[in-house]
Image (tube, grey):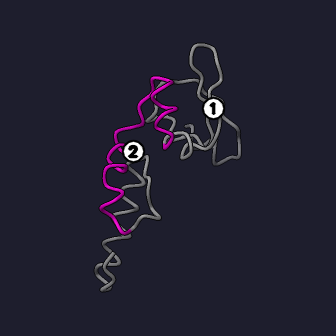
Amino acid sequence: MLKELQNEGRTILMITHDMTLVAEYADHAAVLSGGELLATGTVNQLFTDHELMHKAGLKPPPVAILSHLLIDESSLRNDFPIFTAEGWVRHWLKASAAFREGVHY
């Protein structure tokens, strides 16, 4: 339902501690802790700011953690970081297609 509303061009405001939900649906986010606004930015900016995430007591979604661990092992660096399962599917489909065409990443 949230994706349908987004596709209609509607702005959605949500308050959550569920970072998987944030990764799946948000383009931009604000991080609050103890009633204080710590940061605002794109989900990519916020999830890759490890100090900020630690200070706010938040953990990126498991897919983002896996993405971070594999970043140095991939030559498809432009695809990283990946925050959602859908992003991983796109990444592997792209890598598989390239491999079949003889392009090794």
Coordinates of residue 34 in the picture (x, y in percent): 58, 13
Residue range (magenta): 48-75
**The disc labelled 2 sits on which kind of residue?**
Ala
Taking the spot 38% from the left edge, 62% from the top edge, the residue there is 91
Say whether residue 25 is left or right of residue 94: right
Judge depth for marks 1 and 2 and give the one in front: 1
| Residue 61, quarter of picture | top left
Report the number of discs.
2
| Residue 73, quarter of picture | bottom left
In space, the residues marked 1 and 2 are separated at their CA atoms by 19 Å
Q: Is residue 58 above or below residue 42?
A: above
Q: Residue under circle 1?
A: 39
Coordinates of residue 9 in the picture (x, y in percent): 71, 46
Q: Residue under circle 2?
A: 64
Say whether residue 73 is left or right of residue 77: left
Tell whether position 35 is magenta: no
Coordinates of residue 69 in the picture (x, y in percent): 31, 49
User: Foreground residue, 79 or 18?
Assistant: 79
Question: Which disc, if any, is residue 94?
Answer: none
Taking the spot 44% from the left edge, 53% from the top edge, the residue there is 81
Q: Secondary structure at mark 2?
A: helix
- Quadrant where the C terminus is found in the figure: bottom left
Crowd rating for badge 2 (residues with CA inside 10 Å; few <14, some 14–19, many 20+)? many
Q: Secondary structure at mark 1?
A: strand
User: Foreground residue, 55 or 41?
Assistant: 55
Tell whether position 54 is magenta: yes
